[in-house]
Amino acid sequence: MGLKIAISGKGGVGKTTFAGLLCRVLAKKGMRVIGIDADPVANLQAALGIDEEEQIIPLSQLGDLISERTGAKKGEIGGFFKMNPKVDDLPETLSREAEGVKLLVMGTVDHGGAGCVCPEAVILKALLTHLVLYRDDVVVMDMEAGVEHLGRATTARMDRLLIVVNPGRRSQVAAKQIRDLAKDIGLANKISLIGNRVRGEADIQRLRETMPDFDFLGFVEETEEIAQADMDARMPFEKVEGAPASILAIADKLIELAQKPETP
């Protein structure tokens, strides 16, 4: 089953830690999982327990590869280059694996005019399109607070955009902004919230009251292990079976949603 999940949210809400745990839980269920780090501040490697001494160079910075596949040098704007470069081998050749999860680090287009058509933007888009449209792996994408890595070609196959919020009001404002962006590319009916770092029923009730027009897929309680792992920039729970039951329940709900036929 090719479950496709994108995860977004304001920085500091625990989005990457949640993404890493979700990847590990789904892999533990026997699924082939690809975790995509599409956040400019790449931390999914640590959340998955991959040794940080094993430096992973983001795809967008692999100048020789970009040149080979597109026919143009990284950073070039305009000119002629391939718009459909070969990428089907990259999930195997560029990924690092841990806990049954293959990790791909995408990186960003970091020069001026990043929104233009350039070789690195083309190869990033081509790889994401390949992963979402043409593979039956489970894909979990850890994004920045936006939907920049998603385009109309891929959103039709996304099963869910999860926006992570906590009881703080700033994360809730960000969630509303992300929802507006997601609606513009056709994800209006595939958005759910994850209430993260809740400290009890009062926090859950507060989130429901302040965000009544959102669908909450689940709530993840604050734990000492997760808080300490965030501080130490390490993977929480050496054995994923020790993760909060709420995360296991969210994984089951996502699988159920993916199996339901879409309503017109």
Image: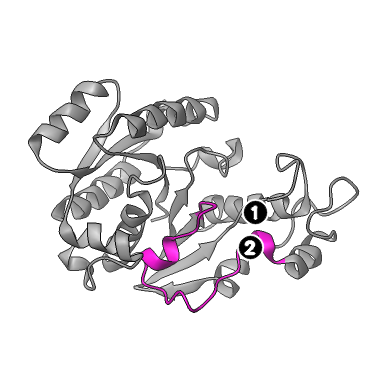
Q: Evaluate whether residue 208 shows in this view.
A: yes
- The front one of 37 and 46 is 46
Disc 2 to disc 1: CB gap under 8 Å:
yes
Q: Which residue has dot 2 on it?
A: 59
Q: Residue furthest left?
A: 201
Mark 1 is surrounded, within 10 Å at the Cα level, by few (under 14), some (14 to 19) or many (20 or more) other residues, namely many
> Is 40 within the magenta?
yes
Q: Tell me which segment is drawn in magenta.
A: 38-62
Q: Quadrant of residue 258?
A: top left
- Residue at 32% from the left image edge and 66% from the top image edge: 232
Q: Which residue has dot 1 on it?
A: 124
Q: Position of residue 92 (x, y in %)?
A: 55, 72
- The front one of 76 and 84 is 76
Residue type, label 1: Leu
| Mark sitting earlier along the chain (2/1) | 2
Tell me if residue 168 comes above or below residue 157 in the rendering. Answer: above
Q: Position of residue 10 (x, y in %)?
A: 41, 40
- Label 2 sits on a secondary structure element that is helix
* Left or right side of 38 for 197: left
Magenta residues, dominant SS class = loop
* Left or right side of 181 for 129: right
Q: Position of residue 13 (x, y in %)?
A: 33, 44
Q: Quadrant of residue 8?
A: top left
- Distance of label 2 from label 1 (alpha carbons): 7 Å
Q: Position of residue 236 (x, y in %)?
A: 26, 65
Location of the N terminus by quadrant is: bottom left
Residue type, label 2: Leu
Mark 2 is surrounded, within 10 Å at the Cα level, by few (under 14), some (14 to 19) or many (20 or more) other residues, namely many
Q: How many marks?
A: 2
Q: Evaluate whether residue 34 shows in this view.
A: no
Tell me if residue 56 comes above or below residue 264 in the rendering. Answer: below
